[in-house]
């Protein structure tokens, strides 16, 4: 297994897992035309050198750059690797309604269709709305696989006891982006504290200098100068957050796949409050695992948080149901089994690997090289 990615702080951790690591000099955004050309050329060289049986591109930019690089590396070649493209949510490019976003959507859709269409590959989405959106762009719906989320290790993320203390803590775990609803969450908590509720907000996650939608550290420090709001910065082990927080909140309008932060919170037995948008709906089932609120509706967000903050029994019931949902549909094992089954299907179509007659997830892929 070869992992090709930008490397910052986690190179050793990747290698310690036994993977070969090939650093790529790119940024998530803002490469420019010259930087994009360099990255695509580097990926193409990597593919020619490694000669993988499968390439698995994860997230929109790798899907686009990797798809172009694959075409360049194996143009008119019968040895082109099997292709799996994972769209981990369509992001702000499809979720925003500004004129600029709408203008970008058409060329982005065309590019996706060009790199995925006609390749015989598979496209993976995490929610039904993204599947429908890609089908509208002209991607063959018969080649779109639905695998909900990236999985949760339920032996590591276990139900936690209700936090103690006089104030009820609410946590938002994500990058500190406006699109993730950070400012809406702060406004809701500000409103509830003004009404006399003993409630506080924990913001856990880094800023994102590559994203123009990110709050700056100075803006976050100014925000947390208010009583009842605390920014924890990057957190290595988010279980420490859920030990403190009784409620998980994510008022995101970002265009999520299935938010990992909600999956981990539910696995820890925390009730969920999230925006009623694709991805969040997969894990937040109204009055079962949490509460959905309209995007950008601070009033409804505050009402939902207040309702759960004042009802410990309801929090417990929603948290138990959320844990059960994770165990049934979102575990690491389930996602790995479905992904390996897709690898087998893609390889079988390329006549590289016999279709296993065993239950998916049971047969080794040790003789197959993947990038």
Image (cartoon, rainbow, N blue to C red):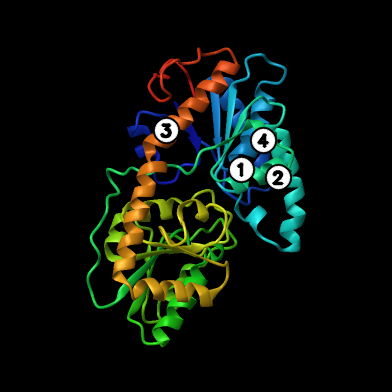
Give the residue pinned by disc 1. Answer: 61
Q: Position of residue 281 (x, y in %)?
A: 52, 55
Task: Work out whether 175 lies above or below 68.
Answer: below
Question: Callout 1: few (<14), some (14-19), or many (20+) C-alpha neighbours within 10 Å?
Answer: some
Taking depth in this image into account, of 92 and 208 the one nearest to the observer is 92
- Judging from the image, what secondary structure is the residue with disc 1 in? helix
Residue 249 visible? The answer is yes
Q: CA distance from mark 3 to mark 1?
A: 23 Å
Q: CA distance from mark 1 to mark 4?
A: 21 Å
Q: Position of residue 354 (x, y in %)?
A: 50, 12
Q: CA distance from mark 2 to mark 1?
A: 13 Å
| Disc nearest the viewer among 3 and 4 | 4
Of the residues under marks 3 and 4, which one precedes in the sequence?
Answer: 4
Q: CA distance from mark 2 to mark 4?
A: 31 Å
Asked if marks 3 and 4 touch (Cβ < 8 Å), the reply is no
Q: Residue at x 46, y 57 (%)?
A: 284
Of the residues under marks 3 and 2, which one precedes in the sequence?
Answer: 2
Give the residue pinned by disc 2. Answer: 33
Give the residue pinned by disc 4. Answer: 141
Residue 21 visible? The answer is no
Give the residue pinned by disc 3. Answer: 336
Residue 169 falls left or right of residue 74: left
Task: Work out whether 144 lies above or below 352.
Answer: below
- Judging from the image, what secondary structure is the residue with disc 2 in? helix
Question: Callout 4: few (<14), some (14-19), or many (20+) C-alpha neighbours within 10 Å?
Answer: some
Residue 162 falls left or right of residue 362: left
Of the residues under marks 3 and 1, which one precedes in the sequence?
Answer: 1
Q: Residue at x 57, y 54 (%)?
A: 278
Residue 318 falls left or right of residue 207: left
């Amino acid at each position: 297994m070869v992992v090709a990615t930008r490397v910052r702080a986690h190179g050793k951790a990747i290698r310690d897992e036994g993977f070969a690591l090939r650093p790529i000099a790119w940024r998530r955004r803002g490469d420019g035309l010259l930087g994009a050309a360099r990255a695509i050329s580097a990926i193409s060289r990597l593919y020619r050198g490694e000669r993988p049986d499968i390439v698995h591109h994860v997230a929109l930019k790798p899907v686009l750059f990797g798809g172009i690089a694959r075409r360049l590396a194996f143009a008119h070649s019968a040895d082109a690797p099997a292709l799996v493209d994972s769209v981990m949510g369509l992001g702000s490019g499809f979720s925003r309604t500004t004129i600029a976003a709408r203008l970008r959507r058409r060329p982005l859709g065309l590019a996706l269709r060009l790199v995925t269409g006609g390749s015989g590959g598979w496209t993976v989405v995490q929610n039904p709305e993204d599947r429908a959106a890609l089908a509208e762009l002209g991607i063959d719906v018969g080649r779109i696989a639905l695998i909900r989320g990236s999985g949760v290790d339920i032996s590591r993320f276990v139900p936690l006891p209700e936090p103690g203390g006089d104030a009820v803590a609410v946590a938002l775990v994500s990058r500190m982006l406006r699109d993730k609803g950070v400012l809406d969450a702060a406004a809701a908590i500000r409103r509830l504290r003004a009404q006399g509720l003993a409630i506080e907000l924990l913001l856990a996650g880094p800023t994102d200098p590559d994203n123009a939608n990110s709050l700056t550290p100075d803006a976050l420090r100014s925000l947390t100068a208010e009583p009842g709001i605390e920014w924890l910065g990057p957190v290595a082990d988010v279980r420490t957050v859920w030990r403190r927080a009784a409620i998980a909140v994510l008022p995101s309008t970002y265009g999520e796949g299935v938010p990992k932060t909600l999956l981990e919170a539910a696995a820890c037995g925390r009730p969920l409050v999230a925006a009623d948008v694709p991805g969040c709906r997969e894990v937040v089932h109204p009055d079962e695992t949490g509460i959905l609120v309209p995007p950008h509706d601070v009033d409804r967000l505050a009402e939902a948080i207040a309702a759960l903050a004042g009802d410990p029994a309801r929090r417990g019931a929603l948290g138990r149901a959320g844990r059960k949902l994770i165990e049934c549909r979102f575990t690491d094992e389930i996602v790995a089994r479905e992904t390996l089954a897709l690898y087998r299907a893609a390889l079988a179509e390329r006549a590289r690997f016999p279709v296993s007659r065993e239950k998916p997830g049971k047969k080794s892929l040790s003789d197959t090289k993947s990038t």
